[in-house]
């Protein structure tokens, strides 16, 4: 940090005189930390307060009255409980299915040369950049024809589309990063292709694949627009429900539900902290 | 060592995934649950609660017909259900929708396809008690039967508004005298804001011209002065012309005393006051000409799987006993004429049992909302 | 030669299943939808014309919405990028409790569904919301609403995008050899020089990736502008939904979607150009 200070002083001279005050310089990262903490945690804390507010009118700093009554409202509502169930059903199914379809493709993108490789890899970007609203009519017609409308597998399929990009791009980078000579050595001592893949390649690639799976899970878990069209009225998942709650219920109910909806992802957060920082993400986005 | 640690890590992740997945599988509903009658109901949560906790249990007890309700929160997927019924009709299949409670405009949308049963006193005896000139029946092309009505009313904070407006023009005057203390929700997102806009339209045109079945795009030009009027209010609206998202957002602004006056649904206003989400100073009143109201009707598909049960439920819903529950729960109007309601109920609701203005038909509503966005919200200052 | 052919066939075979899904559920519907916007009925005949696009550009509120969308997206990308880069640099080059805490902190928004993030932001920033309440006790009255306008959208988009941007940038920074930085220091370069001459160019791929993916993601986002945005002007995604469901004009809605895709594709093209040039340079 002190080196930065020198460089800055060189350029701006006396204007930033306070930079030479060591205490200020040392406290800068701490200030940055506090600012970021306020920005990131502030909205969440305000949400938690609302979830336990019985009565809260401006300008009280804390609710005038704490209460658990909104939790009853949420748990007493059958469709809310169902939506939690449906979300826990669809998102993991989507993630596993997506892995099944996409991982072989990712391996091929990383290891094989074939015509149109770059173009195909790139085309998956379109899955996330064409606004879904423009596709509703076509997609709905298609799903009706396939008898997938308002079914579980219909919802799985529509959520699957949003996971393709993550499940192909990140693992492609991961597989590419694995040294070929390791695989070749295994082949030399007589291991079959499949055995080499499962015993050598897969374990090394696992953390990268988990990161991909994590992003796919979050994408599926968060999908609301497509699920609403395809799933309703049988499969209303949590994010779909959340729209209703935000617009139609008193603020505290929305807050309670927000907290419930965050719990499953919070478990993931604790498990994934370390995994995410190992740098698998950028590797996946090269062509 | 480090490597071993990582492996432990993935195992935990895997176990967690499997655990969550099993939990989820447990929740897959059993297939082929047979219900006596399947009802598709839409609306806000108070409607859902009323069916879930009061109407359906009572109906099941009295008739021993099993019910299954599919609730469309806030009318979500309303068009999809009509499309589904049309698709079933075209392919000659029965539909699982035995009874559909929705906005009259959706019923009208399916009317030309011939998907609805004509309801008369011959197939539903209690239909004789329903006034067929109600907006719900007219807007739905004659196929929708009203069973509940709530209307939009004016909510005001009596602490700050000493002489409440009695007419729509009074409201307009009050808005200009008290800048920043009034708003209505974006008509795209809610009925109470639409009501405020429709009454402005009716100031310069005849309501009857737009509430019927016919549509003529040229008639819309008559609304121009109304949009100019609404646009001229913009500087006086809360937060320099902010129209919140949804009915509830307006109630919250009232609750936080950000604003002192706004149009709200009568039933929502009453229930918010009951739950302590609005200060006691908030009062509800109807003005003249009244805001629009009556946003829901029931229709029964001709090829419903259990059509007879559907008709039976509708007939039961129009009994004065069921209607009393509806009126009490929603603090609204009954579907049948007031004269068929018990006397004590009539007396209790004498205060709000007034008329409301008819809604424009679906196509005109769409035009009104689009033009409002273009000419009022999107007009710049 | 034979083995190359076999490799090509196997590769294609493995790639086809997800690609079929893409064709079937995205590319064909998209093409169908866009063709539909070009089809216009004229005196009983179906002709192809750009009439809808002309109408779209003649509607003032729509023109304004397109400009607004691009401005908001650029602002969000800019702010996110600056914050995320600072964060990534600190996490890469500093050790200690501040670094550990920051590392745990920045990742949180990734796990909060966007609906909830938007909702939380509303309770936090609205008129008489938490910020306003806090300021009230410091003596500041009448804090204007920080949500339901462009500020609200930008703040929420930044909130939601920080983890992803930081992760990609950090991954790029971790790929830079410490030896390179040390040698730059050895020849007497200050931190700023080192950053400009060594770190920034070496991290260019990650930078391009972050910028373009952020741009595409924010441009297409619906939930945040829908819940946190104002009445007018609105982001294109919200306008599309209104035309589709409220105004009964799906044709205009799809025309807007096509336009939005074209803008996103331009960002995509920058990304491809940038990444391929870098890759060729590296080889």
Image (spheres, coloured by chain):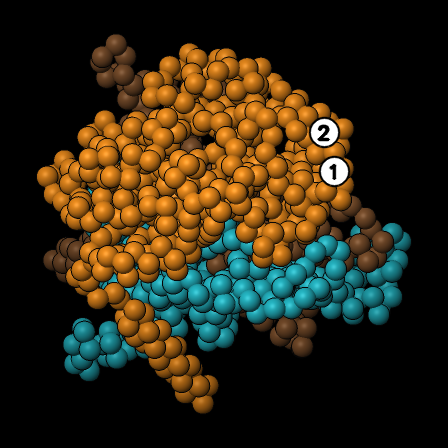
Chain colours: A cyan, B orange, C brown
Q: Residue at x 26, y 48 (%)?
A: B313
* Residue B82 visible, this orientation: yes
For the residue carrying disc 1, how many other residues have a C-alpha within 10 Å: few (<14), some (14-19), or many (20+)? some
Q: Residue furthest top?
A: C43
Is A61 positioned to the left or the right of A277 in the image? right
Q: Residue at x 82, y 51 (%)?
A: C140
Subunit that carries the residue with mark 2: B
Which image quarter: residue B337?
A: top left
Give the residue displayed 31% in from the left and 23% down from the top. Answer: C38
Which image quadrant: the N terminus of chain C? bottom left
Q: Nearer the viewer, residue C130 or B200?
A: B200
Say which chain tag 1 marks. Answer: B
Q: Position of residue A134 (x, y in %)?
A: 35, 37
Instruction: Give the residue number, with chain letter if any, for mark 1.
Output: B161
> Label 1 vs label 2: CA separation?
9 Å
Label located before the other in sequence (1 or 2): 1
Find numbered disc 2 in the image and state the secondary structure of the residue it sits on. Answer: helix
Most extreme residue toward the front is: B343
The image shows residue B202 at horizontal and vertical percentages of 52, 20
Residue C205 visible in this rendered orientation of the protein: no
**Neighbour tally class for label 2: few under 14, some 14-19, many 20 plus, Cα within 10 Å:** some
Q: Pointers 1 and 2 in contact (CB under 8 A)? A: yes
Where disc 1 sits, the SS reads loop
Foreground pick, B24 / C156: B24
Picture coordinates of residue C266 (x, y %)?
44, 37
| Image-quadrant location for residue B360 | top left
Residue that carries the numbered disc 2 in the rendered image: B174
- Up/down of B294 relative to C116, above or below: above
Of C156 and A257, nearer the camera is A257
Q: Nearer the viewer, residue A123 or C5?
A: A123
């Amino acid at each position: 940090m002190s080196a930065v200070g020198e460089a800055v002083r060189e350029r701006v001279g006396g204007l930033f005189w306070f930079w030479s005050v060591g205490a200020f310089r040392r406290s800068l990262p701490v200030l940055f930390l506090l600012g970021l903490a306020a920005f990131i945690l502030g909205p969440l804390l305000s949400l938690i307060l609302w979830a336990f507010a019985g009565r809260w009118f401006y300008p009280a700093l804390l609710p005038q009255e704490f209460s658990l009554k909104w939790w009853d409202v949420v748990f007493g509502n059958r469709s809310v409980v169902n939506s939690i169930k449906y979300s826990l059903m669809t998102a993991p199914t989507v993630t596993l299915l997506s892995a099944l379809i996409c991982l072989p493709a990712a391996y091929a993108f990383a290891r094989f040369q074939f015509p149109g490789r770059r173009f195909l890899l790139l085309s998956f970007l379109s899955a996330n950049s064409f606004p879904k609203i423009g596709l509703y009519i076509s997609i709905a017609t298609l799903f009706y024809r396939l008898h997938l409308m308002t079914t579980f597998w219909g919802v799985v399929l529509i959520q699957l589309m949003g996971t393709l990009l993550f499940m192909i791009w990140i693992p492609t980078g991961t597989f590419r990063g694995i040294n070929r000579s390791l695989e070749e050595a295994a082949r030399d001592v007589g291991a079959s292709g499949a055995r080499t893949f499962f015993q050598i390649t897969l374990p090394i690639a696992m953390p990268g694949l988990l990161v991909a799976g994590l992003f796919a899970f979050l994408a599926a878990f968060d999908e609301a627009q497509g699920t609403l069209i395809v799933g309703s009225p049988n499969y209303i998942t949590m994010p779909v429900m959340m729209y209703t709650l935000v617009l139609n219920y008193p603020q505290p109910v929305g807050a309670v539900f927000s907290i419930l909806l965050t719990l499953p992802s919070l478990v993931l957060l604790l498990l994934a902290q370390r995994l995410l920082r190992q740098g698998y993400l950028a590797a996946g986005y090269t062509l | 060592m480090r490597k071993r640690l990582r492996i432990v890590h993935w195992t935990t992740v895997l176990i967690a995934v499997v655990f969550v997945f099993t939990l989820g599988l447990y929740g897959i509903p059993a297939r082929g649950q047979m219900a006596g009658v399947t009802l598709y109901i839409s609306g806000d949560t108070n409607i859902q609660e009323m069916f879930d906790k009061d109407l359906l249990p009572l109906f099941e007890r009295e008739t021993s017909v099993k019910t299954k309700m599919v609730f469309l929160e806030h009318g979500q997927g309303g068009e999809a259900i009509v499309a589904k019924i049309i698709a079933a009709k075209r392919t000659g299949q029965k539909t699982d929708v035995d009874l559909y409670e929705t906005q009259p405009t959706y019923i009208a949308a399916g009317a030309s396809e011939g998907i609805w049963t004509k309801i008369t006193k011959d197939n539903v005896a209690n239909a004789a008690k329903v006034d067929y000139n109600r907006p719900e029946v007219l807007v739905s092309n004659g196929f929708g039967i009203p069973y509940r009505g709530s209307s939009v009313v004016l909510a005001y904070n009596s602490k700050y508004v000493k002489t409440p407006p009695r007419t729509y023009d009074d409201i307009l005057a009050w808005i200009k005298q008290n800048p920043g203390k009034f708003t209505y929700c974006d008509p795209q997102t809610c009925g109470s804001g639409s009501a405020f806009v429709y009454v402005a339209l009716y100031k310069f045109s005849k309501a009857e011209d737009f509430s019927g079945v016919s549509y003529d795009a040229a008639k819309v030009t008559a609304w121009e002065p109304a949009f100019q009027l609404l646009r001229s209010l913009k500087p006086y609206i809360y937060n320099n012309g902010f129209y919140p998202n949804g009915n509830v957002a307006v109630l919250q602004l009232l609750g936080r005393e950000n604003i002192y006056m706004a149009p709200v649904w009568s039933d929502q206003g009453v229930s918010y006051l009951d739950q302590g989400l609005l200060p006691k100073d908030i009062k509800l009143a109807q003005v003249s000409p009244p805001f629009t109201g009556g946003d829901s009707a029931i229709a029964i598909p001709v090829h419903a799987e259990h059509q007879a049960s559907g008709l039976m439920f509708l007939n039961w819903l129009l009994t004065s006993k069921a209607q009393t529950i509806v009126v009490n729960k929603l603090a609204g109007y009954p579907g049948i004429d007031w004269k068929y309601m018990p006397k004590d109920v009539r007396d209790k609701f004498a205060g709000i049992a007034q008329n409301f203005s008819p809604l424009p038909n679906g196509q005109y509503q769409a035009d009104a909302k689009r033009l409002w966005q273009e000419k009022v919200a999107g007009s710049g200052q | 030669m034979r083995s190359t052919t076999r490799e090509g066939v196997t590769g294609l075979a493995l790639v086809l299943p997800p690609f079929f899904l893409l064709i079937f559920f995205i590319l064909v519907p998209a093409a169908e939808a866009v063709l539909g916007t070009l089809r216009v009925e004229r005196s009983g005949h179906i002709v192809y014309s750009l009439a809808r696009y002309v109408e779209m550009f003649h509607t003032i509120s729509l023109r304004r919405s397109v400009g607004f969308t691009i401005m908001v997206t650029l602002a969000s990308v800019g702010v996110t990028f600056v914050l995320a880069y600072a964060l990534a640099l600190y996490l890469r080059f500093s050790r200690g409790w501040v670094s550990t805490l920051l590392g745990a902190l920045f990742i949180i928004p990734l796990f909060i569904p966007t609906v909830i993030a938007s909702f939380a932001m509303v309770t936090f920033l609205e008129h008489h919301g938490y910020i306003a309440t806090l300021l009230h006790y410091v003596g500041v009255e009448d804090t204007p609403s920080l949500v339901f306008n462009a500020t609200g959208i930008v703040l929420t988009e930044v909130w939601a995008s920080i983890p992803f941007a930081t992760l990609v940038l950090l991954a790029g920074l971790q790929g830079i050899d410490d030896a390179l930085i040390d040698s730059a220091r050895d020849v007497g370069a200050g931190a700023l020089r080192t950053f400009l001459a060594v770190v920034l160019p070496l991290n260019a791929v990650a930078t391009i990736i972050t910028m373009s993916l952020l741009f595409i993601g924010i441009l297409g986002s619906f939930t945040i502008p829908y819940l946190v945005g104002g009445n007018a002007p609105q982001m294109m995604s919200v306008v599309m939904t209104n035309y589709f469901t409220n105004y009964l004009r799906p044709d205009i809605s799809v025309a807007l979607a096509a336009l939005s895709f074209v803008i996103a594709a331009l960002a995509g093209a920058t990304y491809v150009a940038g990444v391929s040039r870098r890759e060729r340079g590296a080889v």
